[in-house]
Amino acid sequence: MQLGTEQFDQVAMARDMIMRGYINNAVKLETQLSMKTIRTLRSKLTAEGLAKNPRGRQIRQGQSIIKRSEDREDVTILMLAYRNYGGENILMSVDINALNLAYDTYVLVKSEINRHPVDFITINDAYGLAQELRSDDAMFEQCASCDLEYFISIRQECSTKCPFCAGPSHAIAPAESVVA
Ligand SMILES: [Zn+2]
């Protein structure tokens, strides 16, 4: 296989993305490599124990990711970190390096809070939200009450109010039975 410099960079990026758990669709969108090349790379990396098959194949959108108030806090931590690393350019294009750094920060913060580790947003969810931000389908709002910024997706079906102000006194108690 002969590779030009540009293609070499793309392969290096694809390799990095696969090892971080990005699905093939995301790798293809960011590297422009063929699906065949990406699948070959993934099977090599998987054989070497450097990659796992990610759950799911589709890039989810805000409406599937942001469902509960905890999710609203999580996406805000993640996406504010993303903007911090990527700057205003993230409104024009997805910045994978900034997204990776933001994801690491999010995982670290979340691990320190030590809350339901199974509920972590995945790197592919982070990618979906970054795409929405780039496409103006998501944005940052500033809370008039506490002055904090928070992330909202125009597709999210739960409340778009500030996740930090909505304390328990404002929450509607779900009428569900408790399973022992
Ligand atoms: Zn607030």
Image (spheres, rainbow, N blue to C red):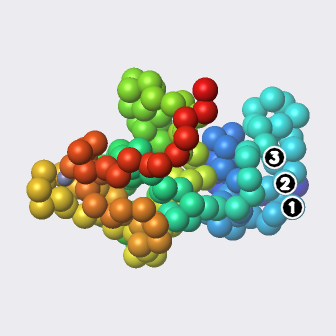
Front residue of 44 and 136: 136
Q: Looking at the picture, how far across and down is residue 7, in whole percent?
A: 70, 60
For the residue marked with disc 2, what is the amino acid? Arg
Residue that label 1 marks? 36
The secondary structure type at the circle numbered 2 is helix
User: Does residue 28 sit above or below 1 in this rendering?
Assistant: below
Is residue 10 or residue 14 the one in the foreground?
A: 14
Badge 1 residue CB within 8 Å of ligand 1:
no
Quick one: label 3 or label 1, which is nearer the N terminus? 1
> Which residue does the image show at 47% across and 71% down from the upper left?
155
Q: Is residue 167 above or below residue 110?
A: below
Nearer-the-camera pick, 155 or 25? 155
Amino acid at dot 1: Lys
**Label 3, on which residue?**
42
Contact (Cβ within 8 Å) of mark 2 with mark 3:
yes
Mark 1 touching mark 2, by CB under 8 A?
yes
Q: Quadrant of the N terminus?
A: bottom right
The residue carrying pointer 1 sits among few (fewer than 14), some (14 to 19) or many (20 or more) residues within 10 Å by Cα, namely: few
- Location of residue 20 in the rendering, given as x and y in whole percent from the top left corner: 63, 41
Mark 2: few/some/many CA within 10 Å (<14, 14-19, 20+): few
Q: Which mark is residue 39?
A: 2
Mark 3 surroundings within 10 Å by alpha-carbon count, few (fewer than 14), some (14 through 19), many (20 or more): many
